[in-house]
Image (cartoon, rainbow, N blue to C red):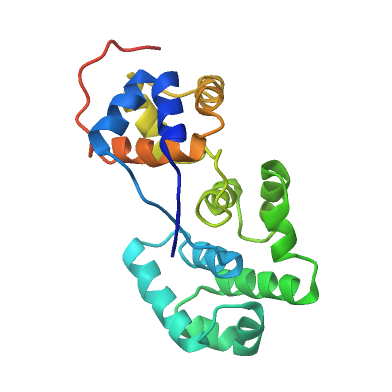
Amino acid sequence: MTVVEYGDEATDWLRSRDPALGAVIDAVGHIRWEVDPDLFAALTHHIVGQQISTKAQAAIWARLREGLGTVDAPHVLACGPDRLRAFGLSQRKVDYVLDFARRVHEGSFDLEGVARLPDDEAIAALTALHGVGEWTAEMTLLFTLQRPNVLSYKDLGIQRGLCLLHRHRRLTPTLFARYRRRYAPFCSVASLYLWKVAGGEVPLPGRKETP
């Protein structure tokens, strides 16, 4: 894992734009932003973890990493579908992982090239892969490509954090876009704190409910 360093510029900006979030920042203190910079391994890990428990994901991922030695396209292709299934992957996930590895091996998916794309183009390239949806692409931007301005409407934790923090009954796309504009260009740091709120780790004072 790699730690992304962000300084007072980000947290001071968020405090100035949203005093309620600023109070959370003060209560929680600095949050480590840990990332896995290996795009192939990170995406494979996401695919492995789809629609299963965290415990199951960890067990399957440990078997896969031990079995492959190195999680990259050549090792995945050399492994083949039978061994991937033996690690615990469903047939659909085996198909997704092998398709991803083939694209990387053949050059139709350029790992380094995608890492250099603007956010919207990177999301488009990632979601063109089988088994990668918008949420997975956004989490890849945040936790692998280290992009500073990611706030995901698809993430239920982010929605819950904003609703708890600002006493919204529900978060419409229009309202969410307002928060995204408010937190830019430091949405990724805001996301780290909103997940803390969603997890109940921050006591929130009573506030008047807003629509």
Q: Position of residue 141 (x, y in %)?
A: 58, 50
Q: Residue at x 42, y 20 (%)?
A: 16
Relative horizontal placement of residue 143, taking residue 125 as reference (left or right): left
- The one of 30 and 108 positioned closer to us in this rendering: 30
Establish if 119 lies above or below 130: above
Relative horizontal placement of residue 2, taking residue 70 as reference (left or right): left
Image quadrant where one finds the C terminus: top left
- The one of 132 and 198 positioned closer to us in this rendering: 198
Count the numbered circles shown: 0
Quadrant in the picture for residue 6? top left
Q: Residue furthest front?
A: 8
Q: Position of residue 193 (x, y in %)?
A: 36, 37
Q: Residue at x 51, y 39 (%)?
A: 154
Quadrant in the picture for residue 7? top left
Relative horizontal placement of residue 1, taking residue 95 as reference (left or right): left
Relative horizontal placement of residue 155, taking residue 43 as reference (left or right): left
> Is residue 128 visible in the rendered structure shown here?
no
Image quadrant where one finds the N terminus: bottom left
Q: Residue at x 28, y 39 (%)?
A: 29
Establish if 133 lies above or below 19: below
Establish if 76 lies above or below 23: below
> Is residue 137 visible in the rendered structure shown here?
yes
Q: Position of residue 97 (x, y in %)?
A: 61, 72
- The one of 9 and 127 positioned closer to us in this rendering: 9
Q: Position of residue 43 (x, y in %)?
A: 57, 63
